[in-house]
Image: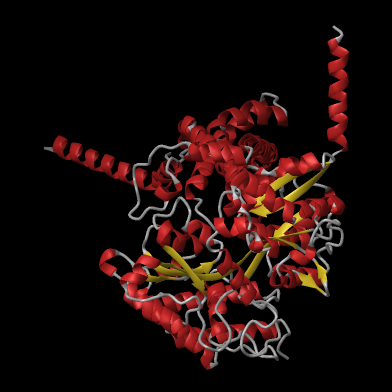
Amino acid sequence: MARQVSTRRKLAFTALAWIVALILFFPILWTILTSFKTEQEAIASPPMIIPSWTIENYIEVQIRSDYFRHFFNSVWISVGSTLIALLIAIPSAWAMAFTPTPRTKDVLMWMLSTKMMPAVGVLVPMYLIFRDTGALDTVWGLTIVLTLINLPIVIWMLYTYFREIPVDILEAARMDGAILWKELVYVLVPMAVPGIASTLLLNVILAWNEAFWTINLTASKAAPLTAFISSFSSPQGLFWAKLSAASTLAIAPILVLGWLSQKQLVRGLTFGAVK
Amino acid sequence: MRLLPLLAGSMLLALAGSASAETITVATVNNGDMIRMQKLTDDFTTKNPDIKVEWVTLEENVLRQRVTTDIATKGGQYDVLTIGTYEVPIWAKQGWLLPLDNLGADYDVNDLLPAIRNGLSMDGKLYAAPFYGESSMVMYRKDLMEKAGLTMPDAPTWDFIRQAADKMTDKAAGISGICLRGKAGWGENMAFLTAMSNSFGARWFDESWKPQFDQPEWKDTLQFYVDMMNADGPQGASSNGFNENLALFQQGKCGMWIDATVAASFVTGKDSTVADKVGFALAPDKGLGKRGNWLWAWSLAIPAGSQKAASAEKFISWATDKAYLELVASKEGWANVPPGTRTSLYNNPQYQAAAPFAKMTLDSINAADPTHPTVKPVPYVGVQFVAIPEFQGIGTTVGQLFSAALAGQMSVDDALKQAQDVTTREMTKAGYIK
């Protein structure tokens, strides 16, 4: 009897998990399906579920815009900003996790508070700085901006992971004669690999999807995939199928990355959740 | 082996050639005519081998935000901007645009349609060259009109439109008698409603910039619009903009649609299920001497911060010259030529034959007067907008109120009262009202 109840509960939870997953995935699925429709099918009412599987939208998107140039800009910007952010965040999070001061919590909150400011509020000063330093429409300029934007989240995440590591282990390393950088590189980092990996992946996703700064600070040379998508929305004329094709191409790499690294992501996000 | 030095030499020459070429960046919107221009860029670069063209295509609102930031800070990211008749007078007054004085000896500036040219000029100087122009007109289903036992006049009144909408509506068959913009935004429902209000004798401001939403003309306009749409409009009309109404009309679900003249080629094109059943008429009036049609032109301008003004002007001359129209016609046919900018196009028999809506488009454009948009005198320029920097914000807020009235979330009276209050507050803050 107990086994029956347990099996039923398992089935119910599995069904519920599938329903939630399908609801979450539905917008992406619909975008992918729409990308294989004609423009008329894309706006048909009632909506058409099964497309005619045309690839003309993908051909048109490639003819009108250089996907690979935008793709490589996205890769440089997201990976570059993530690596720089990690380089800064690991020592910062180490300091705050293992040698806290009475003000550590305030500093963390202050860093996070910068994320609460609407980006458009600092657009003009940022634009002027970029203009005067020649950073407008450059990959390096965007990399710096995205590093700074995501740094508070990276530090917060790493701080949370590092707090789960027993300080005794680091002290033991010190007693064995490990100097600071060896303690960081050979003791702390290997123990926090799941946390660092999930932080890295999450930050790459955040940087990949960032649209405000990447559109406002670029023109043609450094424009990433967010600008690529934006170019397919039209005020006059049908565009949903082409826009969906552009969106599918833009999200495909990050979807694949998330799929391949889901184990690390989940492991990292649940790191220290159960004691 | 002898080939090697030759190859190296030619590569060096090619490199030297590309190094000396000046690159101009053109910011534009994504619509059919602009995409066509992008595809024809080779014609320009062949004629001007010393100039290379980089394109930045953005969604209209993103483009507006992007180029406004760049031009206001003199960022110099763009050498040619695609802007509308709303921006040109404001930006020219600010000194943000360069006058187009050197479009070339062959550039026939007098051939530009006077209404469009006036909208893009300040103190007699042209600050942007029109790439394509549009007004608004009535597009209707001839078969449904006939079934309703009515004949659409060339110049209908609003009362006739209401009567026809009532008769053409067939809810059981999913046909709405009329489809109009309801989506909130200064360039969405407010473009339509401002133009419509002109024909009802309403105005945004009196001569001393006092908002006029508390006047009977605005009440008549909004009440007429809401009543007609509630009776004969499609479901969820408060979310419909140009594209949503276009889709409905193309699928045969609208009896009439009043919107941009540029839609004529879409509703008679290959994607339309009713292409052979569409008729055209001027925007309606109320017998007060003004019609409810607007005037808009996507135009090319040079920002004052550009370091490559001479090359940019050459490009603008190429893209807006008569020869460009002939180039498009030779590649894609006369029906695909960007409309609404040049008188000569409308005198061209080949264009008249290819575009049955040509005369109606020209008449609609000519009927719009940005300097005298409505019956009473006004202190501003613009038919479906008020050419002041504050209008984008105010227009969108008022648009949200009117859209809410259409959705039944508030009464017409409440929407007008709140519109009056918010506009008075913003205009006082901006210093127009002392």
Q: How is the image coloured?
A: secondary structure
Figure check: A231 above or below B149:
above
Figure check: A186 above or below B269:
above
Residue at x-position 44% and y-position 85%: B223
Report whether B103 appears left or right of B274. right
Which residue reaches farthest front?
Answer: B349
Report whether B373 appears left or right of B171. right
B99 or B71: which is nearer to us?
A: B99
Figure check: B224 above or below A260:
below
Residue A67 % position (x, y): 61, 37
Which residue reaches farthest top?
Answer: B1
Residue at x-position 70% and y-position 76%: B388
Q: Quadrant of the C terminus of chain A?
A: top left
Residue B219 % position (x, y): 49, 88
Residue at x-position 36% and y-position 63%: B253
Residue A181 % position (x, y): 72, 30
Q: Quadrant of the N terminus of chain A?
A: top left
Quarter assignment of residue B60: bottom right
B99 or A98: which is nearer to us?
A: B99
Badge count: 0
Figure check: B388 above or below A180:
below
Residue A232 % position (x, y): 57, 49
Q: Determine if residue A162 is in view.
A: no
Quarter assignment of residue A159: top right
Quarter assignment of residue B114: bottom right
Q: Determine if residue B12 is in view.
A: yes
